[in-house]
């Protein structure tokens, strides 16, 4: 494989992959290659099947555009999370979406650490090809190779059809996860040509992307394809049982009025009709319909159980959350934006054993900190911990119990959105990871801009790149950041200035010990 310059019309380096040559663009010391296929189009008979390697192409393929996106509901305005979606997706959605993007300081023999980004979007949307995920700043600052990937989402990526169709469509409900595995295989086989080290690959993702990292830690097929994992606002506590995945598939097929015996009709469905039906489908008991599935083939057990049984041994992990993960969702949901005490009790009762004592505990703790204790604020705090922080701690504790390395963080830099009422909400960390927080007025309105924001971004990038390089996120600014254990509970706090604390918010954590709760994104338990 080779790399060479051809400075014509602003395009730069040509790299030869195993499937053909690609030509990207170069800017300020970073070379970007976009829209590279890592698998064949999963269309026709290939729909709902494992991905296959791409067909080689002749000549030189232009790799200068973000390319296509997985089929998903069209997004014209996603409010505070608009930056997660490339708004072009209404025109660029395609089943032929299995593409990735590479950002490198040099397509040479540098053998740099490789960071592979798995996007979020609730397993129903999002794309690795969107400007907020531009890896140029991160690659430049850390002298690393950054890769962002697509995978099938929604009913095309996470729908178990094998049982209902008697194997005529052998979908496990993990086709999106298999796409991620295939991307990692492509990276193993090709990334050296882009200056990356296939023996030092860190997978990192946010929200559904972090939950995907958690599933990959448990997936035997992914073994050896990555060497470290960073989980942002998601962990190893998200997966459907096989029975629930079959129930979801049955409900969706009934909504589509397609009998499971008619595999031909399913394969011929227009993707837009399938996605429209799936986006409005809600499984019994609530929770996310589409997520990884414990199918006994791709995933043999619940991801956290797999970690407890050694699946992630030898893989350093960095896991954490935003301080106010669920506040934005709480305030933007009419059902929870203006709760009274009765409404708070009713909401918490859906998913938590002995909800009254939990609510009273949060009220007491927050009152002692002189922070808001109105019912809506209490609900946001409880759901932040139930859905996000406690699963992160559960993963860190599971690894610590095995003597494995896990580091824990909390991101506490606050969003200026709508006068700062969101605190540090879900997804705010993304712009700081990629250094794209102030790339436009729109992004700065959510992430923030200025000296403090720039400082937090720099520290976060330094920690992530050091983790990718060494397995520890400890930097000169956070030199006492130790692996997580149940005595000290060392936690990196990303705010201006950054700091390391022992057992932050520990009173809140203690309220959950021994308490029965629903899975964070599963059906209600009570």
Image (cartoon, grey):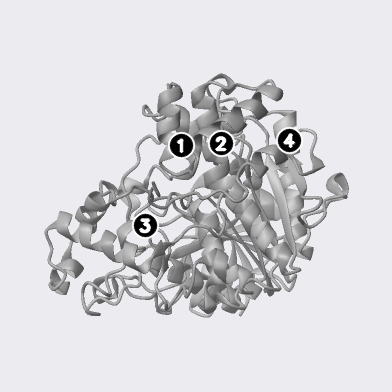
**Residue 213 location (% of width, % of height):** 56, 62
Label 3 element class:
loop
Q: Which residue is mark 3?
A: 290
Alpha carbon of mark 3 to alpha carbon of mark 1: how far?
Answer: 23 Å
Tag 1 and tag 2, C-beta contact below 8 Å? yes
Q: Do callouts 2 and 4 mark residues in contact (Cβ within 8 Å)?
A: no
**Quarter occupied by residue 78:** top left
Q: Residues within 10 Å of mark 2 (few under 14, many from 20)?
A: some
Callout 1 secondary element: helix
Q: In the rendered structure, which disc, 3 or 2, sits on the residue that comes first in sequence?
A: 3
On screen, residue 191 above or below 340 = below
Mark whose residue sits in front, 3 or 2: 2
Determine which residue is flagged by label 2.
Answer: 358
Which residue matches tag 1? 348
CA separation in Å, label 4 and label 3: 33 Å
Residue 118: give x, y in percent of width and height. 53, 58
Upstream in the sequence, badge 1 or badge 2? 1
Which residue is depicted at the point 50% across and 40% down?
A: 354
Residue position marked by numbered label 4 in the rendering: 495
Earlier sequence position, callout 2 versus callout 4: 2
Under tag 4, what secondary structure?
loop
Q: Nearer the viewer, residue 411 or 68?
A: 411
| Residue situated in front as seen by the camera: 498 or 486 | 486
Instruction: Please report the residue visible at 68 percent of the width from the left and 73 percent of the height from the top.
Output: 313
In the picture, the disc for residue 120 is none
**Between marks 4 and 1 in the image, the one whose residue lies nearer the viewer:** 1
């Amino acid at each position: 494989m080779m790399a060479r310059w051809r400075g014509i019309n602003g395009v730069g380096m040509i790299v030869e992959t195993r499937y053909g040559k690609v030509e990207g663009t170069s800017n300020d010391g970073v070379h970007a290659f976009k829209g590279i296929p890592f698998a064949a189009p999963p269309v026709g008979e290939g729909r709902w099947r494992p991905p296959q390697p791409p067909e080689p192409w002749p000549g030189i393929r232009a790799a200068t555009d973000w390319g296509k996106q997985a089929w998903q509901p069209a997004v014209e305005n996603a409010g505070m999370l608009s930056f997660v979606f490339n708004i072009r997706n209404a025109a660029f959605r395609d089943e032929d979406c299995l593409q990735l993007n590479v950002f490198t300081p040099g397509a040479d023999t540098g053998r740099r650490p490789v960071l592979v980004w798995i996007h979020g979007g609730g397993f129903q949307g999002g794309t690795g090809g969107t400007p907020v995920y531009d890896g140029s700043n991160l690659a430049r600052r850390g002298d690393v190779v950054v890769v962002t990937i697509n995978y099938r989402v929604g009913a095309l990526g996470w729908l178990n059809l094998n049982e209902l169709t008697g194997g005529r469509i052998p979908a496990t409900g993990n086709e999106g996860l298999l796409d991620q595995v295939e991307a990692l295989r492509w990276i193993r086989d090709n990334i050296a040509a882009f200056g990356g080290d296939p023996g030092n690959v860190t997978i990192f993702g946010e929200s559904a992307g972090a939950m995907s990292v958690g599933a990959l830690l448990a997936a035997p097929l992914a073994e050896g394809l990555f060497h470290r994992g960073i989980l942002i606002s998601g962990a190893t506590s998200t997966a459907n049982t096989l029975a629930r995945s079959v129930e979801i598939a049955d409900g969706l097929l009934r909504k589509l009025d397609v009998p499971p015996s008619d595999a031909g009709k399913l394969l011929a469905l227009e993707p837009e009709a399938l996605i429209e039906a799936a986006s409005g489908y809600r499984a019994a008991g609530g929770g996310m319909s589409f997520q990884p599935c414990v199918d006994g083939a791709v995933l043999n057990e619940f991801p956290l159980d797999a970690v407890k049984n050694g699946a992630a041994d030898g893989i350093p992990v960095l896991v954490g959350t935003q301080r106010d993960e669920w506040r934005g969702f709480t305030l933007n949901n009419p059902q929870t934006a203006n709760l009274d005490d009765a409404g708070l009790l009713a909401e918490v009762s859906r998913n938590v054993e002995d909800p009254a004592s939990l609510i009273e505990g949060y009220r007491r703790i927050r009152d002692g900190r002189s922070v808001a204790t109105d019912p809506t604020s209490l609900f946001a705090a409880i759901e932040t911990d139930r859905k996000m922080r406690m699963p992160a701690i559960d993963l860190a504790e599971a690894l610590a119990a095995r003597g494995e390395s896990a580091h824990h963080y909390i991101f506490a830099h606050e969003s200026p959105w709508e006068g700062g009422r969101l605190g540090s909400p879900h997804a705010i960390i993304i712009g700081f990871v990629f250094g794209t927080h102030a790339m436009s007025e729109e992004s700065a309105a959510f992430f923030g801009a200025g000296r403090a924001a720039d400082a937090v971004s720099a520290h976060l990038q330094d920690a992530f790149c050091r983790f990718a390089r060494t397995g520890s996120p400890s930097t000169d600014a956070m030199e006492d950041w130790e692996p997580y254990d149940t005595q000290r509970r060392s936690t990196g706090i990303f705010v201006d200035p950054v700091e390391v604390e022992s057992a932050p918010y520990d009173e809140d954590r203690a309220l959950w010990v021994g308490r029965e709760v629903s899975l964070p994104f599963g059906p209600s338990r009570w």
